[in-house]
Image: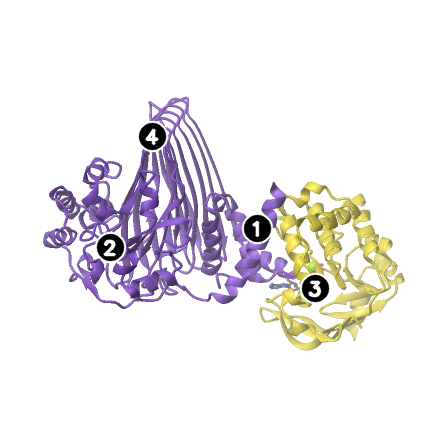
Chain colours: A yellow, B purple
Amino acid sequence: MLLKVENLQAQVEEKQILKGLNLEVKPGEVHAIMGPNGSGKSTFASVLAGREDYEVTAGSVAFNGEDLLEMDPEERARKGLFLAFQYPVEIPGVSNKLFMQTAVNAVREEKGLPPLDMFDFDEYAREKIKLLDMRADLLERSVNVGFSGGEKKRNDIFQMALLEPKLCILDETDSGLDIDALRIVANGVNALRSPERGFIVVTHYQRLLDYIKPDHVHVLYNGRIVKSGGFELVHELEEHGYDDIIQQHQGE
Amino acid sequence: MSQAHELTSSTQYEEINELLSKNKHYKEGFVTTTTVETFEKGLNEAVVRAISAKKNEPEWMLEFRLKAFAHWQKMAEPHWGKAKYTPIDYQDYSYYSAPECGACGGACSTESENAEEVIDPEVAKAFAALGVPIYDDQANIAVDAIFDSVSISTTKREELEKFGIIFCSFSEAVQDHPELVQQYLGTVVPYHDNYFAALNSAVASDGTFVYVPPGVRCPIDLSTYFRINEAKTGQFERTILVADKGSYVSYIEGCSAPIRDTYQLHAAVVEVIVHEDAEVKYSTVQNWYPGDDDCEGGILNFVTKRGICEGKNAKLSWTQAETGSAITWKYPSCILKGDNSIGEFYSVALTNRRQQADTGTKMIHIGKNTRSTIISKGLSAGKSDNTYRGMVKILPSAEGARNFTQCDSMLIGNQCGAHTFPYIEVENPTAQVEHEATTSRIGEDQLFYCQQRGISEQDAISMIVNGFCKEVFSELPLEFAQEAEELLAISLEGSVG
Ligand SMILES: Nc1ncnc2c1ncn2[C@@H]1O[C@H](COP(=O)(O)OP(=O)(O)OP(=O)(O)O)[C@@H](O)[C@H]1O
Ligand SMILES: [Mg+2]
């Protein structure tokens, strides 16, 4: 099992947001999480990534059999957990290249691999840049500074491609992408699919899922997964919205 | 070119990590115990006379002191800066302290054959611990080591003498080169210039004197290391640096002080004279004790540094990395008098905890086609306040003068402040003045983003901060650039969260 989440409960500023969430991701699987605004999707992603503001009050998360909640955020990242942010952050004064070289070397160190020097890294980055059809000059610029919304998202996926994580969590990476960019990002994700790697894709739209064909689809509502199914669930949601599920759930 | 640069910055930054794990505190904070002669606390004319007598000074020097003291008594302590301090009780400080064997400031043994014989072993240990090479060794740098009020040792003097370069303590220069000292003392910073300059002129302790003769390129870096040791003792160093026609010199100063629980006063004056076609690079890495978490016990650093580009094509660069002191009040300036002369100011000022820095520069353009560049990087963390205050003044005579100013502030966390006060006065219509300013903030979001990519919080801060300061550090001599980066990393510990 790549990821096993059991009865996860978490709060922020005394407010309970995750209220007993269960999820299992096996290597090679792609899970989509959908759900209305404010249901806790980003919170779930942040808790997995180890953001301090979110306090876990109950439950457990095992990542490759290890207790994820015990680890620092950087340790989680080095062990292969990657989060593409809903809102990627700008870091003025630090070139994207130095940033990613540092990150790649941190992960390589964890794997017991020697660091890549500037030249090795350049070569390595060039392959991945092609994959995402990014402008090469974005590497020289400060991390996300002055990037368009779509460029920022693409940059996050580019970072994912460089780090080759074991579990990729994409939080609304498709929001704000034009049609071409969406296809490119989807291709990037598909290129990374492998029997060892798992994905959790948070999205509001069917379009991205059409490209990447998730194995499982979940609906998160009010801090819990209230419905799970296969790809057909996406069509159902697209047609009927969340109302049916919510009502059913509230009736319980 | 840019590739090589980035390679080094990423390796340097590994070293910072290593350092971070070792240095948890202000490591220069130790106290040296040795036999010292320290004056009673208090300041009056008798004290001024006593300092002069201790140093065996000629009449003209005593007169300079007395004139300054009389003037100082009529002046008011300045409180216009952004940095707030309670009025200083000048009677509560001692104005002279020296390890006993060096009590005359070198005036008794003008030519000591072997420095090792006369240096107090405890003092020698202190400098060794600070990594200051006070014995000649293989060091590729000449050092004037100043301990409280006196210069302890000046290295490489003979080697430098071969070139006609004078490198000695200020006290020695008064004895051995009175004509030169009289020619330049108080010409760039008059004794009445400002409150702290007047105080310094009255009670000047020791400092460095440098003279580079015409056409000589000084083969090694010259440096001074200032160490405050005695409690409640002010340090008032006086430094004069003269680069005669067509000469070149790179001069570096460093400083530190022990951890004390009351504020320590430091008021220095530096005068630099650059003649025709000469160039001076003046670099400072300032690491005075900043005080405890509330900055109690830190150094109050009131400094007047000013240089004049006297002749045409003269060039003066100030580069400073300011990380210490409870309060820093400092505006290294250039008077660009010679036609085509160039003034530069590169500064990184970092404040953390409750430190306050009010620093910047003045560029006074007098000559034709004079040029000045100001690059200021202010970093504020903790609950500190960081102010850039700079003046660019173009006089009517400065036909074709140009200035470029870039003034960037970075805030780390959300309890600190950054302020920018640029004063621009242009009295010649042919002048071009450009000013750019930015402010950015390192927040939790950025650090989390880095951590999510596998980069630790401290590494993330170092990376962001060093990226921000790169332009200035590249102006520092290599070893000092490294030291400055390390200092930043140490000073920033625990600055977020
Ligand atoms: N730092 C915070 N402080 C207070 N409330 C928060 C904080 N972070 C999240 N919340 C609240 O928690 C709830 C869940 O937010 P979350 O961002 O996880 O939703 P989401 O499912 O990702 O929504 P969207 O689809 O709009 O992105 C919301 O009500 C939100 O206001
Ligand atoms: Mg969200």
Q: Residues within 10 Å of mark 1 (few under 14, many from 20)?
A: some
Q: Which residue is mark 4?
A: B245
Across and down, in percent, residue B327 comes to 34, 54
Apparent side of residue A40 relative to residue B442 in the rendered image (left or right)? right
Q: Amino acid at mark 2?
A: Val
Q: Position of residue B142 (x, y in %)?
A: 36, 48
Given the image, what chain letter belongs to the residue carrying mark 2?
B
Contact check, label 2 and label 1, Cβ < 8 Å: no
Q: Circle 1 sits in a helix, a strand or a loop, which is it?
A: helix
Instruction: Chain letter for mark 3, please.
Output: A
Say which residue label 3 marks. A45
Callout in the foreground (3, 1): 1
Mark 4 falls within which chain? B
Q: Secondary structure at mark 4?
A: loop
Q: Is residue B356 left or right of residue A202?
A: left
- Is residue A91 among what the camera can see? no
Q: Chain of mark 1?
A: B
Q: Is residue B46 above or below residue B21?
A: above
Which amino acid, mark 4?
A: Lys
Task: Please say if the residues under marks 1 and 4 sit with CB atoms less than 8 Å apart.
Answer: no
- In the rendered structure, are the residues bearing label 4 and label 2 in contact, judged by CB atoms less than 8 Å apart? no
> Between marks 4 and 2, how big is the CA–CA gap?
30 Å
Q: Nearer the viewer, mark 1 or mark 4?
A: 4
